[in-house]
Amino acid sequence: MTNLLFRMRVAVLWVAVAVAASYSIVLYLVGPGALEEMLGGSMEGDSLDSFALQGFVAGIILIPLAMVPVSLLIADRVNHYLNLVVGGLFGLFGAFAVAAHLMDGGLTGHVVLVAVAGILAFLIAGLGALGLRHPAAAPTAALEGSGRARTGAAA
């Protein structure tokens, strides 16, 4: 897999993680009793004014969205490490969230979307590990062509 292809695939996967995470929040809010609880000033037992809840919701959406340009712009080795670490942590968070919701009340639409986001994050982490294990080779055809042009040899 070329570096550009890897970067584009990972960026698209991060967008998919962000979309799944965002829609899981929307599906949670339209679930039974959630909107009334939110209008009452709390969400899952936490006050809407609490920094922890605000940071959680912002992080769920902003971390995957921030990883899109990061995956496209940073150096290859750092890119692979960062996708491995952030994808793994986001996937672990998704697995923990799914397990917690399944123990509390069962399978709902937002839990399925959290599971999808977690699986995609683990896939990103796997691609990062694969990129570290098998770094892409430099395209030799481009190097050969530029070398011939510099030396004046006929193509």
Image (cartoon, grey):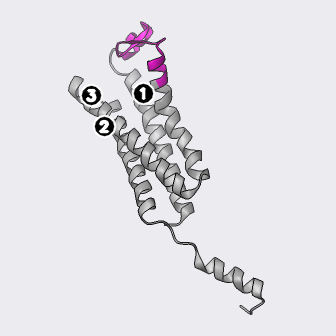
**In terms of depth relative to the viewer, which is nearer, 107 or 48?**
48
Q: Which residues are magenta?
A: 34-55
Q: Secondary structure at mark 1?
A: helix
- The residue that appears at 46% across and 25% down in the rendered structure is 57
List x then y, in percent, for residue 27. 39, 27
Q: Identity of the amino acid at label 2?
A: Ala
Q: Which residue is mark 1?
A: 25
Closer to the chain start, of discs 1 and 3, is 1
Kindly report the distance in space between the C-alpha atoms of the residues bearing marks 1 and 3.
Answer: 15 Å
Count residues near mark 3 (Cα–Cα under 10 Å), then give few for <14, some for 14-19, many for 20+. few
**In terms of depth relative to the viewer, which is nearer, 117 or 90?**
90
Q: Which residue is mark 2?
A: 95
- Report which quarter residue 38 is drawn in: top left
- The residue that appears at 52% across and 57% down in the rendered structure is 77
Closer to the chain start, of discs 3 and 2, is 2
Q: Any magenta on residue 47?
A: yes
- Residue 97 shown left or right of residue 137 in the figure: left
Closer to the chain start, of discs 1 and 2, is 1
In the rendered image, the quadrant that contains the C terminus is bottom right
List x then y, in percent, for residue 9. 50, 55
Q: How many marks?
A: 3
Q: Which residue is mark 3?
A: 100
Q: Identity of the amino acid at label 1?
A: Ile
